[in-house]
Image (cartoon, grey):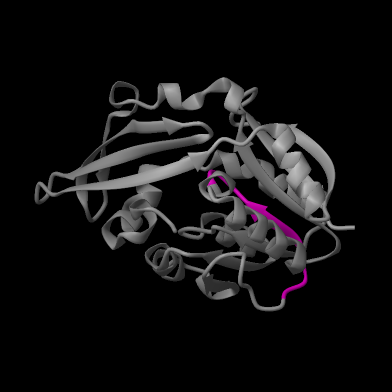
């Protein structure tokens, strides 16, 4: 299940304004070009930033996400008619035959359950044509990124068009093995309302990810350094034989 930051209509509406720098997507655009992908399935497409970016380049895109509020934001953007939007996740998809399946940002780590992760990989495999690729990123747990997630480091005030000033910050609430749970807090100056969004990420070991890909039938082609977080995040490239 998606967290409140994506499912609450008020938070989904300001998501893009609070995170406007999506240079992390540049590497994925380059991989679309590198692999010559003309049909892409974007799993966890959220408010549609990446899907619409690709559609604007003439790529045929399917965007799937379990958060209806985020999909509503995506559907309201210019050019949204060029993307096929699906409310759901990769475990239950209509028949597809795409060149590339992507999970950008935190999507792969937000799938915390072992069964859900296996079924997601199975769904991605089924959606790919033979020779097609799955690409996703995950933070390297060795770097313990969550130790920097605190109010002091994250506090910001953003003037959001149509919503006014919004204060926000993040704090870790629990660490249990591979699972890290944290809470974003949002305060709206316009009416003083406070909303929170709780999230949990699973920090899988690299060897674990590689083994699971193999079990699901993928051939691991590459593990790359994420350009936007060098030395901190890994990008997995796996191919369906």
Horizontal side of 26 relative to 177 (left or right) equals right
The quarter holding residue 96 reads: bottom right
Which residue occupies the foreground of this view, 46 or 182? 182
| Magenta span of residues | 96-106
x, y percent for residue 119? 65, 61
Quadrant position of the C terminus in the picture: bottom right
- Tell me, yes or no, whether the highlighted magenta stretch contains residue 103: yes
Name which residue lies at 66% across and 55% down: 118
Q: In the rendered view, does 71 fall on the left or right side of 44?
A: left
As drawn, the residue found furthest toward the left would be 191
In the figure, 189 relative to 231: above or below?
below
- Percent coordinates x, y for residue 236 in the rendering: 73, 41
- Determine the residue positioned at 13% across, 44% down: 189
Whether residue 225 can be seen here: no
The structure residue drawn at horizontal position 46% and vertical position 59%, both measured from the top left corner, is 47
User: Residue 84, can we see it?
Assistant: yes
Q: Is residue 18 magenta?
A: no
Residue 5 spot, x, y in % from top left: 35, 51
- Seen from the viewer's position, the closer of residues 91 and 14 is 91
Q: Quadrant of residue 220?
A: top right
């Amino acid at each position: 299940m998606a967290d409140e930051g994506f499912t609450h209509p008020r938070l989904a509406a300001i998501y893009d304004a609070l995170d406007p720098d999506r240079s992390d997507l540049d590497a994925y655009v380059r991989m679309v070009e590198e692999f010559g992908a003309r049909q892409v399935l974007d799993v966890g497409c959220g408010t549609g930033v990446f899907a619409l970016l690709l559609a604007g380049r003439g790529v045929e895109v399917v965007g799937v996400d379990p958060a209806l509020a985020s999909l509503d934001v995506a559907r309201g953007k210019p050019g949204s008619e060029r993307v096929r939007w699906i409310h759901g996740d990769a475990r239950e998809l209509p028949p597809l035959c795409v060149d590339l399946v992507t999970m950008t940002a935190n999507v792969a780590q937000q799938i915390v359950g072992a069964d859900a992760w296996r079924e997601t990989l199975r769904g991605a495999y089924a959606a790919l044509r033979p020779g097609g690729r799955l690409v996703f990123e995950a933070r390297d747990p060795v770097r313990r990124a969550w130790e920097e997630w605190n109010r002091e480091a994250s506090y910001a005030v953003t003037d959001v068009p149509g919503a006014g000033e919004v204060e926000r910050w993040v704090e870790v609430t629990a660490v249990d093995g591979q699972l890290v749970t944290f809470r974003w807090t949002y305060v709206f100056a316009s009416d003083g309302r406070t909303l929170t969004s709780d999230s949990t990420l699973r920090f899988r070991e690299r060897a674990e990810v590689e083994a699971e890909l193999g079990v699901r039938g993928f051939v691991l082609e590459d593990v790359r350094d994420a350009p936007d977080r060098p030395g901190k995040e890994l990008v997995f490239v796996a191919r369906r034989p």
